[in-house]
Amino acid sequence: MADPVTMTINGREIQAAPGTLVIEAARKNGIEIPSFCYYEGYSLQAACRMCLVEVEKAPKLMVACTLPVAPGMVVHTESQKVKDARKYTLEFLLTNHPLDCPVCDKGGECELQDMVFRYGAGESRFTEEKLHVQEQQWSPVVFYDGPRCILCFRCVRACNEGMGVGALGVVNRGSVSLIAPNHGDHLECDECGQCIDICPVGALTSGTYRYQTRPWEMEHTGTICTHCSNGCKTTLGVRNDKIIRGNNRDRSGINGEFLCVKGRYAFDFYDHPERLQSPMIRVNGKLEPVSWSKALKHVAEKFSEIKARNGKFGVIGSNHTTNEENFYLQKFVRQGLGSNNIDHKRTGDVVTLIDALSGTTGTLATTADLYEGKTFLILGADLAIEQPFLSFQIRASMRHHAAKVFVVTSKEVREDAYAKKSIRKAAGSEIEALEELREALAAESDLVIVFGSSVKGEAVRKLVAFGESLGKPVKYCALVDYSNSRGAVDMGLMAELHPGYHPSETPGMTLPEMLADETLDALWVINENPLEAAGLASDKAFVVVQDLFLTETAQRADVVLPSASAYEKNGTVTNVCGEIQRLQKAVTVMGTKPDLEIIGLIAKEMGLAPAMGPWVSETVYGEIRRSVKGYDIALPLVAMAAQQTAPVNGRVNVADKSALIQGAHETLFTSGTLGRYSKVLNSVIEKRAGMSLAAQEESHV
Amino acid sequence: MTFSPALEARFEKFLAKYPADRKRSALIPMLIYAQDEVGSITDELIQELARRTGTTPMQVTEVVGFYSMLQRKPMGKYHVQICTNISCLLRGGDELWEQACKKTGLGHKQVAADGSFSLEEVECMGACSWAPAMQVNYDFYHGVTPKQLDVLLDSLAAGKKPEEIAEVKKVSC
């Protein structure tokens, strides 16, 4: 890299890399230059004139957001001339902006309000009438109030560049310019709400948050989104024990401020009217509400009785529960119930990947690698739809690092638009395209490969062999589908694997085997809905279901125990890249208990509590640290930032069960059971299209 | 959407001028010539040009909204455009505009019921030296007085061709 440039800002000598913009150089040195249109990471606009600074020997004030640093440059950011200029700029920005802060959602966290407060341009010299246009609703989640818009075009860039959707545009010109949605009077897009978040004023407001509260009246809880496997941090705004909004404006967490529609809005399943709030026991063929103590006692008695007669248990764990819950569950099932029949719905071939990568280090990609990398190969995944944050990272890498993207999928995907090469191959035969790409990939300095559920078993081994043959650093990510799918594998919710990928000496029954077994005595399902798609062969099985809702599986249950969602408990989850992050409890839903507590109480009722240990998530995490390889990371570190777990670095000697893997192919607007009960996800029109964006575009032409 | 062979050939020429990943640069001339043929910028046209230039329909809509000579609705057979920017204003552009409104009974961007005339108050058309300037379709008229305007509009309405109207100074371009 070239030598740094030395310059002076406000009398302080600073250094910055050549090409750095003055606004960035100042900010990095703790000198604030206000701006509306300039936004780190997106293209330059130079529209708002708020960042004017005085540069010595320059005849006029300069725009700091497009001015690169130069050696010997002397800049003043707080001179009277600059302050006056900012004040007048604000006066212009306020020509049409209404001063309706008391009723505006943004009031209290509005950048324009802050600036006017600081520079005091509240009184206007304009006597012209303000332009007014009616407020518009563009989708269930996006409202647009034209007069409030200061035309910084952040939303347009976030949508075009950040999301790759391009649903927003600017129509007309000059002071009558307006932001417009892509379909005349409404939006058809990812409904991610980034435009609302990034809006410095209250022009774009959220359909679910508007008029609910003032920002300072909320408590904020930073936790991890419970939908897909990307593990974005979402900061939940809570007031009166109600979650009012989700966003991540402080840019903490792996995702910065990125959130998709699920992370931002789909927390709303938690107070769905059909949420289970009382345990139920089947009496005379009907589920009747009972007390917790009665329900737990009933389960414990039945389990003890089945265990005593050496009956057959089948336990299905969840893709959404915490690592602590998963670990405690498998420990209770294996040691307490004496059964290895434990499994979960498998959504990606992590096991084969880890086995194939045996003996290597640093070969598992992190979410940061998906931004830092220079070359990406996407196999068998509609990334923008199924793994929105990973796709966002790759798009950012493309903009900032000119990353090259190669795609092998069965159908058109959004990545095609900027891929160096896109190849169509039927699902399951993606790796046939590898040789075709060898030359192009070999010319690059590094590579990150992400592959979907259709690449499994032997194909994963071939893929790794191909990667190794390229002779350059290659990192991999086996895509999984839900918030803790990866954690479920790591924690041994697998018939053939104990926590930390230790092969079981006596592998138990897998999920389909349990459902098909006519002699099964008990089926215990935790936050999963296996009977949605398959039947239960055993008529006599005693079925216990822990869930948020009365799912198809819960309807078949003998005992239903209402469990707490991820937003109602503490613990840790592991995302698709193996990064462990911490959940923090935001609210309480009356009548429910976290799954960890439910499992612990069942153990207690069975007299197994001393053997199982306390059902306190921090204590269980301590045990995970001691016994699961790769998870020896102190909780305070996890609380501060995501930490990548490094699982076993050795062979995983188990029979290939990759045939069980089935991608859920959740779209942006579906999320298993949780999605079914999210009002927002069900209200957006994009859901009906079933939806690849390409298919949508077609339907509109 | 299909266009005349002549326009298709023109499109091809425009698109060939730019590198493959910069086809969007051809958008503005394509829009202008397509408007002449189609009559206005229809939704269908926006979709089609977005497809041909590798942009999104939204981006095409942005361009159409920015440039005042691109019309979302068909204008009259004679689209009368009068400049009221500073030079023309000083030399009677305002009076000319008022006269045009009075004469045609139309306002800014309005079209006569029979589709014969439409009126538009435009920004500078680069004819400041010959102010006040006006434009009818693609013909420029310089130093126009309200009287000349009446003659011009009457003659056009009577079916005369622009070049047959001797009273007003037409400038070909």
Image: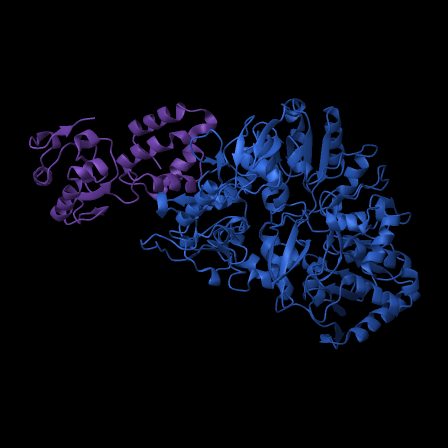
Out of A470 and A513, give the one closest to the viewer.
Answer: A470
Residue shown at 62% from the left, 38% from the top = A29
Chain painted purple = B
Q: Position of residue A550 (x, y in %)?
A: 68, 66
Out of A392 and A97, give the one closest to the viewer.
Answer: A97
Chain painted blue = A
Can you say which quadrant of the picture contains the C terminus of chain A?
Answer: top left
Residue shown at 63% from the left, 63% from the top = A238
Using the rendered view, name the quadrant where residue A22 is placed. top right
Q: Is residue B71 left or right of residue A254?
A: left
In this figure, which colouring scheme has been used for the structure?
by chain
Vertical comparison of B127 with A276: above or below: above
Q: Position of residue A481 (x, y in %)?
A: 68, 48
Using the rendered view, name the quadrant where residue A401 is placed. top right
Vertical comparison of A441 with A161: above or below: above
Q: Is residue A700 left or right of residue A276?
A: left
Q: Position of residue A323 (x, y in %)?
A: 78, 53
Q: Is residue A1 left or right of residue A85?
A: right
Residue shown at 42% from the left, 45% from the top = A89
